[in-house]
Image (spheres, coloured by chain):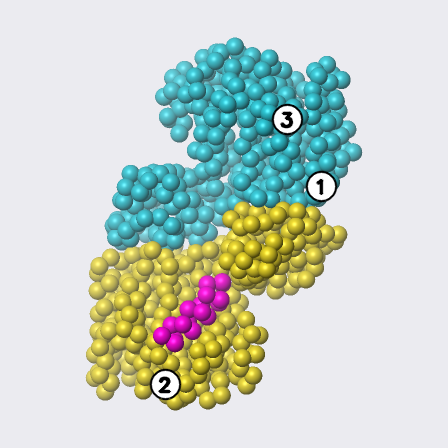
Chain colours: A cyan, B yellow
């Protein structure tokens, strides 16, 4: 996907030392508001100075949506955002009507603080994101005090973006940010977590910013296209969190209006890179795995099949053990509701054929999977559909992190 | 389910020291044919002396079906079986046309040996089951020699049934068998593995026998009804193997003709007990978990929701850690494609409410889940549909067994 994008932007360049404040017109920061017992950074702000304030968002498909998701979905119907306030240390999910009031109060408090600071802002221009354990109310005294404080800390430099990226970390071991500089405009982003690696903690939150001139429709189109090929295909354990949120804000500060194709490509490149960072830092990961299904009846069936394999615990434990157990790959693809002919399926691991036409290839048991990158290619030989899903292995560390968490 | 069954059979009794040879008219045994490198028992025979030879079977829904499944499905279209030959030490799956020829040759060899022994038998009266690593051919010299030998070893006593139950074990740590004695007739059974706990090894194979007078249609009805409520609701990691097979044979030797209801209840009781044994001996199990969904729109939606929770790696790792992390239960049920109102869902662990109307209950984080049995009850409060699924936790031992297996 990066390849396709680079082709569209011969001069564009991805830089991982910059994030949401790389584009002109954005300020950000992260502070410690005392929401996390550890005293680590736990509150982040991304502020759009304009002149434009267009925005789009995609949210979890989970029917159980956290209060901040319900709030932000409502706010986004206007296609406008001035600011995003994010906290780690608590998901504010399954907290009932009082939890929703807490989110609302947070947005009101930020709007008031920004208005006091000199930028007239309404709560309806503020998106809220939360991540942490499901089911507990947030310590609202700390959140509200933090919201007032953070407005005075935000900065336009690159430091602000990195502080924000740090403040949304939970089980993440490194902050995740990237910026893509096109000719005279930029897209930046930060991310934490990945899918539902740990729903109570590792919610995926992503904020993307651009100084391009792009209205809400253009942003929405670019974001949906990019998410479908990136975040939707990063599948660590088959679930999505109650809090997953991806937002894209435009300031128009570059005064450059890219074509939809250019915007799509830039947003895709940033999302793709953030996905790679999320995969590499997934809980308990020891192998970065890509499952590609080719030769499916169509792309949709290829994706269904790839996802089925990516979610299979037995495939994932085998890969953790560097075990070229291709039989498990066949067994998992055989469960997927897709068209296939068992006698025609072929599988390769890192380019080495392990199964040809449904039966083992010579040397299949000796393929070396000891490295930390594993490419699984499954050819169904039934059509021209193709799709890739990124996942990880299922390791002792995954079990450890996820069994020991809230206790 | 056992309860419902006992109500139908006030005088019936389950005995776990007996299995497939408990009903009159059946002989069985297990031998070491040298298929397993360890020299352990690896070949089992169940022989129906008659007078009837009716039979029914249910098979894996995996599109990738092992050669013995393809063979046995074909054979069962006649509704007749004289014998079942089962091997551990190799699944004979993904072995191409030659693998199918191996299965055919095994059935022919057993038919010839039984004919020589004095019972005229055709290969079409012989079902074949295999379990072990996917993708390798069986050592046919050993299999064929074993098939000839085993006919001379089979015995009518209870020892024969237990030897057979031992010979189909793979990662199983104990043989699994049970018999239900109704008034003047009996149903017996043996089982190994459970679902797709390890597709390359822990295929579920089950052979059930009865001396009731019951034709193929009655057997098929009883077996499908029982499997739908038992084996189909035992879900260790969401998959089914290339080799899963459940067979039911009737000899008519008791000369008792139970009603369909009586037959259904007896077969259900035996299947239910074998399921409990499979769950208790699942790979890496430290907790026996039952997920019950009540208050769903209908029973089908209840089952879909229960299965979604039973397959969720994050719920399963939390239970391994004895962690009453009910938020993960809500997050997993929220992904299921069923009708629900997030504000009305309630959850209890072992009878203690942890979530009421979508929000945490007082003391939820302190519920003690340190025992080895965990009952999760999810009430969707949307209707009267209900369903239960048995599963296990996701432990270090599961990862260990499944990562270390074929290497």
Q: Is residue A270 visible?
A: no
Disc 3 target residue: A84
In the image, which is nearer the foreground, mark 3 or mark 1? Answer: 1
Residue at left offset 48%, top offset 17%: A181
- Spatial CA span between label 2 and label 1: 64 Å
The magenta stretch is: B217-234
Q: Is residue B221 magenta?
A: yes
Q: Nearer the viewer, residue B136 or B158?
A: B158
Q: Nearer the viewer, residue B404 or A170?
A: A170
Identify the secondary structure beneath mark 3. Answer: strand
Mark identifier at residue B291: none
A115, above or below A377, in the image: above
Name the image quarter holding residue A19. Answer: top right
- Spatial CA span between label 3 and label 2: 74 Å
Q: Is residue A155 left or right of residue B39?
A: right
Disc 2 target residue: B252
- Pick whichever of labels 3 and 1 is earlier in the sequence: 3
Report if the CB atoms under discs 2 and 1 are less than 8 Å apart.
Answer: no
Chain of the residue on which disc 1 is drawn: A
Disc 1 target residue: A97
User: Where does the image place residue B201, in percent across and percent down from the top left?
Assistant: 39, 62
Identify the secondary structure beneath mark 1. Answer: helix
User: Where does the image place residue B172, in percent across and percent down from the top left?
Assistant: 45, 67
Residue at left offset 49%, top offset 48%: A394
Q: Is residue A290 left or right of residue B120?
A: right
- Spatial CA span between label 3 and label 1: 22 Å
User: Where does the image place residue A170, in percent across and percent down from the top left?
Assistant: 62, 37
């Amino acid at each position: 996907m990066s390849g396709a994008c680079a082709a569209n932007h011969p001069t564009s360049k991805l830089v991982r030392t910059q994030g949401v404040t790389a584009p002109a017109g954005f300020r950000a920061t992260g502070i410690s508001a005392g929401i996390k017992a550890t005293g680590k950074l736990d509150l982040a702000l991304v502020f759009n100075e304009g002149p434009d304030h267009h925005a789009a968002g995609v949210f979890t498909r989970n029917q159980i949506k956290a209060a901040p998701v319900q709030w932000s979905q409502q706010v986004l119907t206007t296609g406008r955002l001035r600011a995003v306030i994010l906290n780690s240390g608590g998901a504010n999910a399954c907290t009932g009507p009082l939890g929703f009031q807490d989110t609302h109060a947070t947005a009101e408090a930020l709007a008031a603080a920004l208005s006091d600071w000199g930028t007239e802002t309404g709560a309806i221009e503020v998106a809220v994101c939360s991540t942490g354990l499901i089911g507990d109310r947030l310590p609202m005294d700390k959140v509200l005090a933090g919201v007032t404080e953070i407005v005075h800390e935000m900065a336009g430099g690159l430091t602000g973006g990195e502080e924000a990226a740090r403040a949304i970390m939970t089980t993440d071991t490194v902050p995740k940010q990237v910026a893509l500089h096109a000719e005279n405009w930029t897209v930046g982003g930060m991310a934490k977590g990945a899918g539902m690696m740990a729903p109570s903690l590792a919610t995926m939150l992503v904020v993307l910013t651009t100084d391009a001139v792009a209205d809400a429709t253009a942003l929405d189109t670019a974001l949906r296209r990019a998410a479908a090929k990136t975040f939707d295909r990063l599948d660590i354990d088959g679930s999505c969190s109650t809090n997953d949120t991806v937002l894209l804000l435009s300031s128009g500060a570059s005064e450059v209006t890219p074509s939809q194709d250019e915007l799509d490509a830039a947003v895709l490149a940033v999302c793709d890179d953030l996905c790679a960072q999320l995969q590499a830092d997934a809980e308990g990961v020891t192998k970065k795995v890509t499952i590609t299904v080719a030769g499916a009846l169509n792309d949709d069936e290829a994706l269904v099949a790839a996802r089925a394999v990516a979610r299979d615990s037995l495939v994932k434990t085998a890969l953790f053990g560097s075990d070229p157990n291709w039989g498990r790959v066949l067994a998992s693809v055989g469960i997927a509701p897709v068209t296939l002919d068992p006698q025609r399926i072929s599988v390769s691991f890192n380019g080495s054929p392990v199964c040809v036409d449904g039966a083992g290839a010579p040397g299949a048991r000796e393929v070396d999977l000891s490295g930390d990158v594993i490419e699984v290619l499954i050819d169904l030989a039934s059509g021209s559909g193709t799709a890739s899903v990124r996942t990880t292995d299922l390791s002792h560390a995954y079990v450890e992190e996820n069994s020991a968490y809230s206790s």
